[in-house]
Image (cartoon, helix red, strand yellow):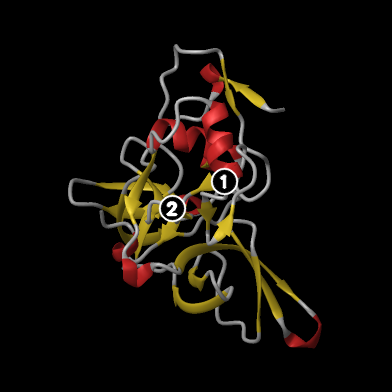
Amino acid sequence: MAHLARSKAPKSWPIKRKETKWITRPNSGAHPLSRCISINLLLKTILKHADTTREVKYIINNKSIMIDKRTVNDQKFAVGFMDILDIPETKESYRVIINELGEFILIPLKKELDNLKPCKIIGKRFLKGKKIQINLIDSKNIIVEKNSYGVGDTVIIDITKNSIVDSLKLEEGCNVFLIGGKHMGVHGKVLKIIKEKSTNPDRILVKTKELEFETLKAYAFVIDIKFIEK
């Protein structure tokens, strides 16, 4: 489906709900609908580089937009949390994050972090030859030699080489950014991991500057604060 009713759009999309009925739906693939935004909408509502889809297509057709250092060719391309956006012609570079209202925003990309992207591990698969495939939240996969990473941990990827340069473990004391739930867009420190004995999902106790609360462990994205500083 190429379009989505504006009234049914995810709350993470920074849009006015009472304008035109239809809005561009991102392609399925790298990110679930609730955690992505189309490059069309991003260019129009966040960057304000275009007013119409025709203008967006013109920008894209001129090879002016890159996500994670790869040229975007489709105005419905799905952009998600921690993706890196480059516009070489204007020398603009941004990282996609979520604000405390739960909406997508862009922050300027720090030069020293230009090629680095934090990715949450959402699955693992053991392969022949004692190798392990780790599955990342942006649908990418990486083969590793050692079983050094757990589901829920974050790996820092050099996106120009598709290689791991560092990792962050989901554990008590780590910093997390919440990518779901009513506290989506908030970051804080994990005080406690609450492991459920029943079929209920595990939870975490998180402390921010203002409050302490429990949320689902699945919403936690372990992060180094330097990646979300504005």
Q: Name the image quarter holding the N terminus.
A: top right
Callout 1 touching callout 2 (CB < 8 Å): yes
Three-letter residue code for mark 1 = Asn
Helix, strand or loop at label 1? It is: loop
Q: Residue furthest left?
A: 210
Percent from the top left, x then y, of residue 186?
32, 47
Q: Is residue 12 visible?
A: no
Asked whether, in this view, residue 171 is left or right of residue 129, the answer is: left
Q: Residue at x 32, y 51 (%)?
A: 107
Q: In the rendered view, tell whether residue 197 sits above or below residue 103.
A: below
Q: Which residue is mark 1?
A: 62
In which image quadrant can residue 192 be found?
bottom left
Q: Count residues near mark 1 (Cα–Cα under 10 Å), then give few for <14, some for 14-19, many for 20+.
A: few
Q: Position of residue 151 (x, y in %)?
A: 57, 66
Q: Please tell me which residue is depicted at 62% across the width and 23% down the height of the picture.
A: 4
Q: 2 and 60: which one is in front?
A: 60
Position of residue 145 relative to residue 54, above or below, is below
The residue drawn where x is 18% and y is 51% is 209
Looking at the rendered structure, the kind of residue marked 2 is Glu
> Residue drawn at (62%, 86%), measured in percent from left and top?
146
Assess disc 2: are there few (<14), some (14-19) or many (≥20) residues with their C-alpha within 10 Å of its C-alpha: few
Q: Mark 2: which secondary structure?
A: loop
Number of numbered discs on residues: 2
Q: Which residue is mark 2?
A: 89
Instruction: Give the side of residue 146 with respect to residue 178, left or right.
Output: right
Where residue 46 is drawn, which disc sits there? none
